Image: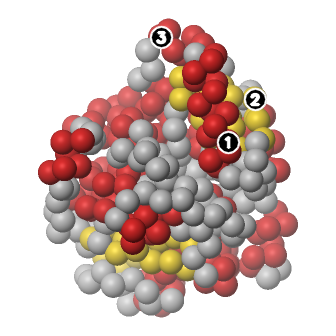
């Protein structure tokens, strides 16, 4: 797949050089996480499966890569006034962590659907948490006000040049460690993670397949792909709460990247998501949030069309509340 000319003309999209530059910029802030074989999942699926453990990042999720790159690229005058973002939790934690590392004030805006433990985690990192409304769109309105009226710099959760480039560093590491990969399975939400991975992976290995996995309950990117343009969806409670929220009607980067570079999109129901969480705990001893387990869930249910013997699965985050986790895995 190649990006359409209209997408290229409207907005300059990140490229492989931008991802490589981001890798140098975030070195020492985000970890180079391990890509580990999963013998039990390989046995069960008949493929060689490797897990990219973004759960080991300091904030427990991949989001640190994009946030660290974006904060590092802020002009000094914007950094002095502070940064803000709208977040379902992991991105807010990442922005708070990156901002604290650079002495930058941070305000994170979230909807009422974000679990309390994620709010507390953001506040622990020194950022102010503001809770507004029932959707990320409501949270985004406060971000817009902070930017317009108070001069803060926005670090969006996904639809941002530097954020996408930062997330793409995962693909650099995966293909350096396992150049034989035939496909990469990636959680799909707003598209920053899969967009960055897809652009870097396909630049390095054009034949590689990129598979996005999301939940049936409020899959904004899939609804937008079906409509051929960004559309609004209702945000609903789900085990994969880190994948919630819209993609933005004025989406500039991630919608064209996903549209043009992602080979398959899979939607999972709640029992399927829970199965992936339970399997990762029982078989690998890993605590993984619902949104981070979806790649494993899709493999277990035989939903991945990607041919080939070697599959990389991005396990994107571990930030799940104890009660939600125990209920999901049936303990």
Residue at image point 49% right, 53% down: 247
Regarding residue 92, the answer to whether it shows in the image is no
Q: Which residue, given by chain and number where applicable, does mark 3 sit on? A: 76
Marks 3/1 in contact by CB < 8 Å: the verdict is no
Q: Which residue, given by chain and number where applicable, does mark 2 sit on? A: 128
Decide if residue 4 is on the left or right side of residue 123: left
For the residues labelled 2 and 1, the Cα–Cα distance comes to 13 Å
Marks 2/3 in contact by CB < 8 Å: the verdict is no
Q: Which residue, given by chain and number where applicable, does mark 1 sit on? A: 139
For the residues labelled 3 and 1, the Cα–Cα distance comes to 26 Å
Mark 3 or mark 1, earlier in chain: 3
Mark 2 or mark 1, earlier in chain: 2
Disc 2 or disc 1, which is closer to the eye? 1
Q: Residues within 10 Å of mark 1 (few under 14, many from 20)?
A: many
> Which of the pair 131/126 is nearer the observer?
131
* Disc 1 secondary structure class: helix
Residue 174 place in picture, x, y as percent:
34, 57
Q: In which quadrant of the rendered view does residue 291 lie?
A: bottom right
Mark 2 or mark 3, earlier in chain: 3
* Disc 2 secondary structure class: strand
For the residues labelled 2 and 3, the Cα–Cα distance comes to 21 Å
């Amino acid at each position: 797949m190649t990006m359409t000319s209209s997408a290229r003309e409207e907005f300059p999209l990140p490229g492989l050089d931008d991802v490589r530059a981001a890798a140098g910029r975030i070195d020492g802030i985000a970890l180079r996480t391990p890509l580990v074989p999963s013998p039990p999942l390989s046995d069960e699926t008949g493929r060689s499966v490797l897990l990219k453990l973004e759960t080991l990042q300091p904030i427990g999720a991949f989001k640190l890569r994009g946030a660290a790159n974006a904060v590092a690229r802020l002009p000094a005058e914007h950094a002095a006034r502070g940064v803000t973002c709208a977040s379902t939790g992991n991105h807010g934690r990442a922005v708070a962590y990156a901002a604290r590392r650079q002495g930058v004030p941070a305000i994170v805006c979230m909807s009422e659907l974000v679990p309390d433990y994620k709010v507390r985690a953001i506040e622990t990192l020194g950022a102010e948490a503001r809770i507004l409304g029932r959707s990320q769109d409501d949270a985004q309105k406060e971000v817009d006000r902070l930017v317009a009226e108070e001069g803060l710099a926005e670090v969006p959760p996904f639809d941002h040049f530097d954020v996408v480039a930062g997330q793409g560093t995962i693909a650099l590491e995966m293909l350096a460690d396992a150049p034989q990969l035939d496909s990469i399975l990636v959680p799909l939400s707003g598209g920053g993670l899969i967009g960055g991975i897809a652009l870097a992976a396909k630049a390095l290995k054009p034949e590689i397949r990129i598979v996005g996995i999301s939940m049936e309950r409020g899959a904004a990117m899939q609804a937008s792909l079906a409509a051929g343009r960004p559309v609004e969806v209702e945000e609903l409670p789900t085990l994969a709460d880190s994948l919630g929220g819209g993609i933005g009607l004025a989406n500039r980067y991630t919608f064209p990247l996903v549209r043009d570079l992602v080979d398959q999109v899979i939607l999972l129901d709640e029992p399927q998501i829970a199965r992936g969480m339970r399997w990762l705990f029982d078989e690998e001893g890993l605590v993984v949030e619902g949104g981070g387990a979806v790649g494993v869930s899709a493999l277990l249910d035989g939903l991945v069309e990607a041919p080939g013997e070697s599959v990389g699965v991005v396990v994107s985050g571990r930030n799940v509340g104890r009660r939600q986790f125990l209920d999901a895995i049936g303990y």
